[in-house]
Amino acid sequence: MSGWLDLSVPVVTGMPVYPGDPEVTVSPALRAPADGVNVLALHLGSQSGTHLDAPYHVDDAWPRLDELPLDRFAGRAVVADLRGLPARSPITPALLAPALDALAAAPGALLLLATGWSAHWGTDMYLAHPWLTPEAAEAVVAAGTRTVAVDALSVDPTPPPGDPHAGSGLPAHRVLCGAGGVIAENLTGLERLVGAEEVEVFLFPLRLRGADGAPVRAIARVG
């Protein structure tokens, strides 16, 4: 396998969002027959669709999106094959062991968590994704990685709808972001990268000043 792969979900009206986040609407603002040009009006949150979290997302004292070095957003990637886990399974350091070994041999590489959960995009099951334990996040940081991407709604567990314990502190976010790292979520099709010998990933966000995060066009180059 070689070439370019799009790892992003399309931005459309009514697309899934994290519980409580702004809903997404995409509608015509100008139309070529009447206005001479086609222009869309967009309403969405900074965490909509395939997006990237800056450290500021979870702590006001941590760096904002536009304060981060550009090398956080692109580079060689290691793919952790985590397919087949049951709903709401913890991703432990033991499950990450092969990927952690590969990260130790490739300082600064990005980590892609390929859970296969993007197959549930648009269904209630999408909220029941596997999640990264704080211990696993600490192991990732210790391996020198500062960029983690996942094909799920979050690296932390997402509470079921109506759960009174929503907002449980986001411990994996706090470990990764506390080390100056970034997190990309809602990628799709990461299983296509499993087994590839060379993977580069590009996760450049919109340049929003002072932001907690922004949508990205996630792209992989393989081969």
Image: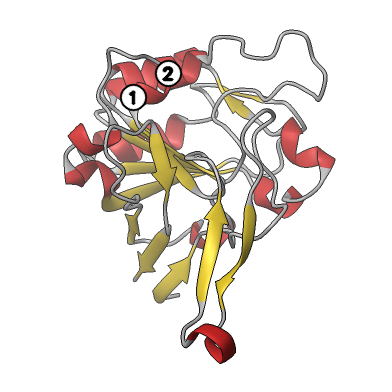
Residue sticking out furthest to the front: 34
Q: Is the residue 176 above or below the residue 197 in the image?
A: above
Front-most of residues 113 and 155: 155
Task: Give the amino acid type for the residue marked by disc 2 in the picture.
Answer: Val
Residue 208 in which image quadrant: top left
Tell me what residue is drawn at x 65 percent, y 60 percent. Answer: 12
Tell me what residue is drawn at x 33 percent, y 40 percent. Answer: 102
Number of residues whose C-alpha sits closer than 10 Å to that of mark 1, classed few (under 14), some (14–19) or many (20 or more)? many
Is residue 62 among the parts visible in the rendering? yes
The picture places residue 62, in percent across and down from the top left corner, at 27, 17
Give the CA distance from mark 1 to mark 2: 6 Å
Q: Is the residue 32 above or below the residue 69 in the image?
A: below
The picture places residue 78, in percent across and down from the top left corner, at 37, 47
Number of residues whose C-alpha sits closer than 10 Å to that of mark 2, classed few (under 14), some (14–19) or many (20 or more)? some
Tell me what residue is drawn at x 83 percent, y 40 percent. Answer: 124
**Is there a contact, CB below 8 Å, between mark 1 and mark 2?**
yes
Residue 156 in which image quadrant: top right
Disc 1: which residue: 55
Tell me what residue is drawn at x 66 percent, y 43 percent. Answer: 23
Front-most of residues 219 and 216: 216
Task: Give the amino acid type for the residue marked by disc 1 in the picture.
Answer: Pro
The picture places residue 59, in percent across and down from the top left corner, at 37, 14
| Helix, strand or loop at mark 2 | loop
Colour pattern of the rendering: secondary structure
Is residue 136 among the parts visible in the rendering? no
- Please count the marks in the image: 2
Disc 2: which residue: 58
Q: Is the residue 148 above or below the residue 162 in the image?
A: below
The picture places residue 69, in percent across and down from the top left corner, at 16, 39
| Helix, strand or loop at mark 1 | helix
Q: Quadrant of the C terminus?
A: bottom left
